Amino acid sequence: MIEIKSCNICESQNRRTIEDGGDCNVVRCENCGLVYMDRIMDAGSIPEIYGKDYFAPWISEMQNARTKLFQKRWHKAKNLTAKGKILDIGCGLGEFLNFAKMDGWEAYGIEISAFAANHASGNYGLNIFEGVLENASFPDDYFDLITIWHVLEHIPDPAAALKEVNRIIKPSGKLVVAVPNLNSALYN
């Protein structure tokens, strides 16, 4: 685990715990209000943790529910911009991107788990980069739509990732980000 000692936005170390998670807490920067996790897995341990055993239930008993979830997400996201190139950061097993591909979009994914990346490319024929976004070397102004579904809060340097997103998304492109909701009953 990497301990995050300061805010990724303002670099303040003054923070308040919102949720005590034992190994990892959700904290709010008292200076700028950014909410983040105070510990994040280091990149070297992520592929080990997110291997075949982790994804097995997703492929078996959770598959139908996940397919419905990603189909619903796709039906909302596809109408944000004209059909073109889509990038899903943290694409997992590729179900969401497969809906984009079936709709005629040029679909790309970023996935740090070798197992998930291989599953997505092998089962759906998707173009998946195994690793982190900053190492994928996409051209400037390349994507029409970029999605980040519950991944941003796990990235050690979200500001750097968003700068890279800004570089590779077209000026008319759309970015969809889903993160935990602090206004939910969990946090109130």
Image (cartoon, rainbow, N blue to C red):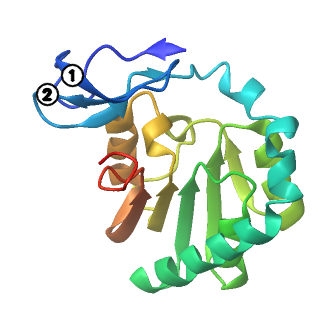
Within the image, what quadrant is residue 66 found in?
Answer: bottom right
**Residue holding disc 1:** 15
Q: Is residue 81 visible?
A: no
Image point 57% across, 19% down: which residue?
Answer: 42
Give the answer, above or below, for where 20 lies relative to 153: above
Image point 81% across, 64% down: which residue?
Answer: 63
Within the image, what quadrant is residue 152 found in?
Answer: top left
Q: How far, Cα to Cα, is label 1 from label 2?
A: 5 Å
Image point 66% across, 27% down: which residue?
Answer: 46
Give the answer, above or below, for where 172 lies relative to 148: below
Looking at the image, residue 156 sits to the left or right of residue 124; the answer is left
Q: Is residue 44 visible?
A: yes
Q: Amino acid at mark 2?
A: Glu
Q: Amino acid at mark 1?
A: Arg
Secondary structure found at label 2: loop
In this rendered view, identify the residue nearer to me: 77 or 31.
Answer: 31
In this rendered view, identify the residue nearer to me: 140 or 88.
Answer: 88
Image point 73% across, 37% down: which residue?
Answer: 113
